[in-house]
Image (cartoon, rainbow, N blue to C red):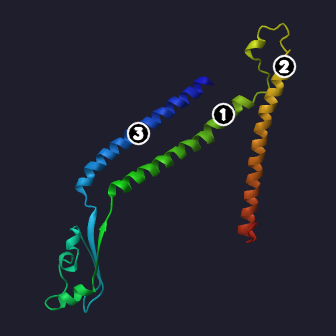
Amino acid sequence: MATLWGGFLRLGSLLSLSCLALSVLLLVQLSDAAKNFEDVRCKCICPPYKDNSGHIYNKNISQKDCDCLHVVDPMPVRGPDVEAYCLRCECKYEERSSVTIKVTIIIYLSILGLLLLYMVYLTLVEPILKRRLFGHSQLIQSDDDVGDHQPFANAHDVLARSRSRANVLNKVEYAQQRWKLQVQEQRKSVFDRHVVLS
């Protein structure tokens, strides 16, 4: 039993160290990638004008140059219509932080991974441990009972302790089953009878 828990602790520490190393590696790459990608742009939305259909233009330029004349390329109209066309366009300067977005995604995926590991623990490991701890109906003597001439002298105390542990476990399982039944009843009420419980 102790070796099983020790194995899980080693596995957990190994997973946490690998997640930390992966995060550091990704953050280093993100800082390099931030230099290569533009996080600012000017976006111009131009509605239909005469024979030209509406169009959206994006360009990576500074905030002071964020206007129709600098962003719309190629200009769909010529001559005196350029000014009228540009007055109809709505240009906005947009800024984002791709590093913040990537870090948020890494945190989200890490939490999702931890929840997945917890689900695996609950479905695979916990039933095995529960069977080992509470599945046997044998009396287990403590270390101070080993030298007794009457081997079952403290059997009543050991049995009472095992019953109290099983009693607590039974209460928890009963509460869980009762909660599941309440949830099923609420689902029936809401989905089948279309009634909301108060």
Closer to the eye: label 1 or 2: 2
| Residue 132 spot, x, y in % from top left | 69, 29
Q: Which residue shows up at 30% across the image and 50% down it?
A: 30
Q: Earlier in the sequence, mark 1 or mark 2?
A: 1
Q: Would you say the residues marked 1 and 3 are in contact, meaning their CB atoms lie under 8 Å apart?
A: no
In the picture, measured across the screen, residue 10 lies left or right of residue 185, that is left
In the picture, measured across the screen, residue 58 lies left or right of residue 10, that is left
Q: Secondary structure at mark 2?
A: helix
Placement of 88 over or under 32, stated as above or below = below
Q: Earlier in the sequence, mark 1 or mark 3?
A: 3
Amino acid, disc 3: Leu
- Which quarter of the picture shows residue 49? bottom left
Q: Residue at the far front: name it.
A: 64
> Pointer 1: what residue?
128
| Front-lying residue, 26 or 120 | 26
> Pointer 2: what residue?
155
Q: Which mark is residue 20?
A: 3
| Front-lying residue, 41 or 140 | 41
